[in-house]
Amino acid sequence: MPTGLKSTSGQIIISGKLSETSANTYTQEEVDLQLNVLDREVFVVTAVDINCNAPQILSAGTDTEVKCAISTTSRTSVGDISNSNVLGALRLEAQGHNGGIYVAFDSSSLQTPPTNMDYIGIISTNNFYAALKGANNNDERTMDYRVYGYRARATADVYAALVQSEMLSSDA
């Protein structure tokens, strides 16, 4: 348990599915955690699992891609784990080469942390965000996600620091 926090629930699993609003269009969904801000309640994230459907393989020489992420604050792009507000990310690529040979690439963050990690992030505002965007696909791509964690109550000073840190990490 992180210092300054006291668990107020058992393990909670939040699952969802998100589809692009149209092909190759950034789409984001807000997931309400219904935290009690008057009691300084936070959500301690212990693991994230993300699945995207594969990018389409089109014609030779055309690269396609699907990017998905879970973040603590709203974003204007999918982002990756180099962004402090991204808890987990997945990128799938299909690179088309001349002659009809295709190469697929999979790049994901550590979606389930080693058992020696107590948590991978703390959400202090009332929500988190799932986002995805395809590139050069003919139709909409989708993502499934699962976020594992538990509710906790923070001391006043820890809560203030967590909220400020989360709001300052908001970036595109």
Image: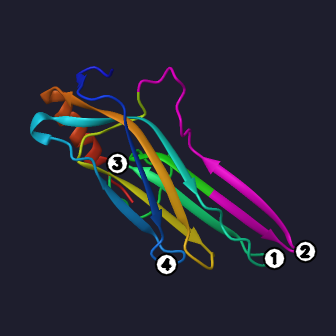
Q: Residue 60: which numbered mark, if any? A: 1
Location of residue 5 by image quarter: top left
Q: Amino acid at mark 4?
A: Ser
Q: Please report whichever mark, 3 or 2, sits nearer to the chain's N-terminal start.
A: 3
Q: The residue tagged with tag 2: helix, strand or loop?
A: loop
| Relative image position of residue 93 (x, y in whole percent) | 68, 61
Q: Which quadrant would the C terminus be assigned to in this image?
A: bottom left
Identified at 54% across, 40% down, the residue is 111
Q: Please report whichever mark, 1 or 3, sits nearer to the chain's N-terminal start.
A: 1
| Relative image position of residue 49 (x, y in whole percent) | 51, 44
**Relative to 51, is 147 above or below?**
above
**Relative to 56, is 91 above or below?**
above
Which residue is the site of mark 2?
Answer: 99
Outermost residue to the left: 38
Give the camera-side residue of 72 and 81: 72
State how far apart marks 1 and 3 are (Cα): 38 Å
Which residue is the site of mark 4?
Answer: 22
Q: Amino acid at mark 2?
A: Gly
Q: Nearer the viewer, mark 4 or mark 3?
A: 4
Write down the region rendered in magenta.
92-118
